[in-house]
Image (cartoon, helix red, strand yellow):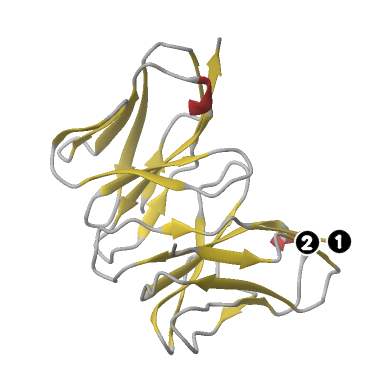
Amino acid sequence: DAEITQSPRHKITETGRQVTLACHQTWNHNNMFWYRQDLGHGLRLIHYSYGVQDTNKGEVSDGYSVSRSNTEDLPLTLESAASSQTSVYFCASSESAESNTEAFFGQGTRLTVV
Amino acid sequence: GQNIDQPTEMTATEGAIVQINCTYQTSGFNGLFWYQQHAGEAPTFLSYNVLDGLEEKGRFSSFLSRSKGYSYLLLKELQMKDSASYLCAGLDSNYQLIWGAGTKLIIKP
């Protein structure tokens, strides 16, 4: 069965360190997204991609970067981790750009920056 | 600006019916989604509406009024496993999802 997986599921890191969260999907979807979810807020879009070599900034992109070298993977990098980046991170994928198709989510990565 | 409003928390009784409301303001409109999210888990798709009216899917139904910028999710015959957060999300003119903060539904026996 097709799926979308994130790793690690939990991560504790120190302020100032670079951290990369992995996201891998086997749906063969063009669209991939990274969100963060914090108490009292909806899912907030960090970065997204509509295909290989395409990346775009979302509403909360400062301090984060992504790259899309193949269809399956969209790793999220925190350049220099800050305590404000402590959150639960979700990766999602969907079929195509101009579409109403549902998004499929990974299980999430809980990141703590100390 | 773009905004999705939904109640923070609701409580209902097992076997009853509950309606979770959502109002939206988006730049353009390409539909409205409802997702379910159990604690500690990923959101999962429940429904999508782009035309006015009610869409029924088993115990769950979703309603949309585009003129009022309003949607609701109706859950019938509530079960304990329906205890979860319900996320409303609008799809704007750029096909970007704008998410509400979610409604935590507590089911009591």
Q: Quadrant of the N terminus of chain B?
A: bottom left
* Neighbourhood count class around disc 2 (C-alpha, 10 Å): few under 14, some 14–19, many 20 upward: some
Q: Quadrant of the C terminus of chain B?
A: top right
Q: Are marks 1 and 2 in contact (CB under 8 Å)?
A: yes
| Residue that badge 1 annotates | A114
Tag 2 residue = A83
Which residue is found at the position 22% from the left and 57% from the top? B28
| Neighbourhood count class around disc 1 (C-alpha, 10 Å): few under 14, some 14–19, many 20 upward | few
Viewer-proximal residue, A24 or B27? A24
Q: Is residue A101 left or right of residue B45?
A: left
Above or below — where is B63 with respect to B92?
A: above
Three-letter amino acid code at the position of disc 2: Ser
Residue name at image x 53 percent, y 85 percent: A67
Q: Chain of mark 1?
A: A
Spot occupied by residue B84 in the image (x, y as percentages of width and height): 53, 32
Residue B39: assigned label: none
Q: Position of residue B69 (x, y in %)?
A: 24, 39
What distance separates the C-alpha of mark 1 from that of mark 2? Answer: 6 Å
At which x and y percent is residue B43?
A: 49, 47
Q: Amino acid at mark 1?
A: Val
The subunit letter for the residue under badge 2 reads: A
Name which residue lies at 55% across and 38% down: B38
- Residue at the location (27% across, 34% down)? B71
Label 2: element kind: helix
The spot of residue B25 in percent (x, y) is 30, 46
The quadrant where residue B16 appears: top left
Q: Residue A81 vs residue A91: left or right? A: right
Q: Secondary structure at mark 1?
A: loop
Q: Which of marks 2 and 1 precedes in the sequence?
A: 2
